[in-house]
Image (cartoon, rainbow, N blue to C red):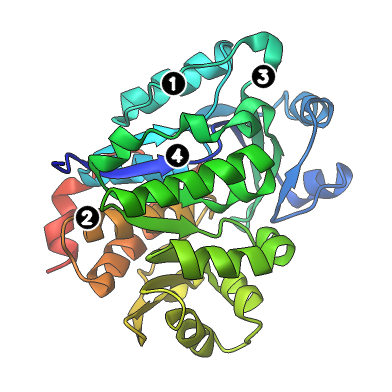
Amino acid sequence: MEKTTDVYGVGNAIVDTLAFVDDDFIRENDLQKGGMTLSDSGVQAQLLSALSHKSLELRSGGSAANTMIGIARSGGSGFYTGKVARDPNGEFYRKDLLDAGIHFDVHPIQESEGPTGTCVVMTTPDAERTMYTHLGVSVQLAESDIDPERIAKSRYVYVEGYLFDGEGPRKACYKALEEARKNNAVPTFTFSDPFLVGRYKEDLHSLVRDYCDVVFMNDEEARGFTEIESLEESAKYIGNIVETGFITNGKKGALVVHNKEVFEVPGFEVKAIDTNGAGDAFAAGALFALSKGKSPQEAARWGNFLASEVVQIHGARLDKDYSSKFGEILS
């Protein structure tokens, strides 16, 4: 079948509420700085009440959705699968993704079954982001939501690791990667968060080895996954179980392992104000470049560029068209 879509993405559909806060706010509200914490709607309501004097912004979010939008901002095409409710947040999410250029026609479920997932994202002056997430109906994503016909028309399938934390979404994760294999699409997975590596290390080893051609992770996730302190040795380990691995390393850039060879691709010097979404933007750039036939090293360079752009703005989503820069950055 003709490949008309660059990437088919699967992940949690989450509406992000963005706010800048200081360290005093983090301490006073006893928050876990720098991480993602699953919370209930009551905790979120308390946080939003405490933030009522702040300027707040809404974004369609979730790790894989941020990546899909980055692909569109690069000039690529994508289809996204995630679960929302038939409520105001769900309609906002659908419209926001469509406006960003990503196809999203998954049918919402009734509001009586739960709300659309939401996340309060608080960024401190050191550019660290602290997230409190209520998953809502995103945890009801199921195998039946995966569209084999869409996958058959896609070059890459990209699945976020956060799906591993629920039984239904985990089955959807495996279904998407299996359909990728069946339909000549490249199966791709991102680890998403160090806590997932700690919780599901053995399962993730099997997933990477048996289902994936390309994986994404950051330095902390790589060290946790391999139990090796040296990042280069971690990359070599990963290269023994998967064809291509990308390990992001903050402002230093990224390591790429491809066909068991390790390459270092330097980052871009910028002043970061918000690190939220850097890994998602990197994955967007790498996937877009790979889908256009570029080498993994070239893909990492475009990924590093998009990551350097997103850390200079508030929020996890790239907010302008970068397609005209592609040839220049890779020249």
The label on residue 291 is 2
* CA distance separating discs 4 and 3: 18 Å
- SS of the residue at dot 4? helix
Q: Nearer the viewer, residue 310 or 182?
A: 182
- The amino acid type, in three-letter code, at marker 3 is Pro
Label 2: few (<14), some (14–19) or many (≥20) C-alpha neighbours in 10 Å: some
* CA distance separating discs 3 and 2: 35 Å
- SS of the residue at dot 1? helix
* CA distance separating discs 1 and 4: 11 Å
* CA distance separating discs 2 and 4: 17 Å
Residue 210 lies left or right of residue 102; in this view the side is right
286 in relation to 313, above or below: below
Q: Quadrant of the N terminus?
A: top left
Name the spot of residue 252 as percent of width and height, x first: 44, 76
Asked if the residue under mark 2 is in contact with the one under mark 3, i.e. CB atoms within 8 Å, the reply is: no
- The amino acid type, in three-letter code, at marker 4 is Ala
Give the residue displayed 22% in from the left and 55% down from the top: 291
Nearer-N-terminus badge (3/1):
1
**Residue that mark 1 sits on:** 94
* CA distance separating discs 3 and 1: 14 Å
To which quarter of the image does residue 97 belong?
Answer: top left
The label on residue 65 is 4
**Residue that mark 3 sits on:** 115
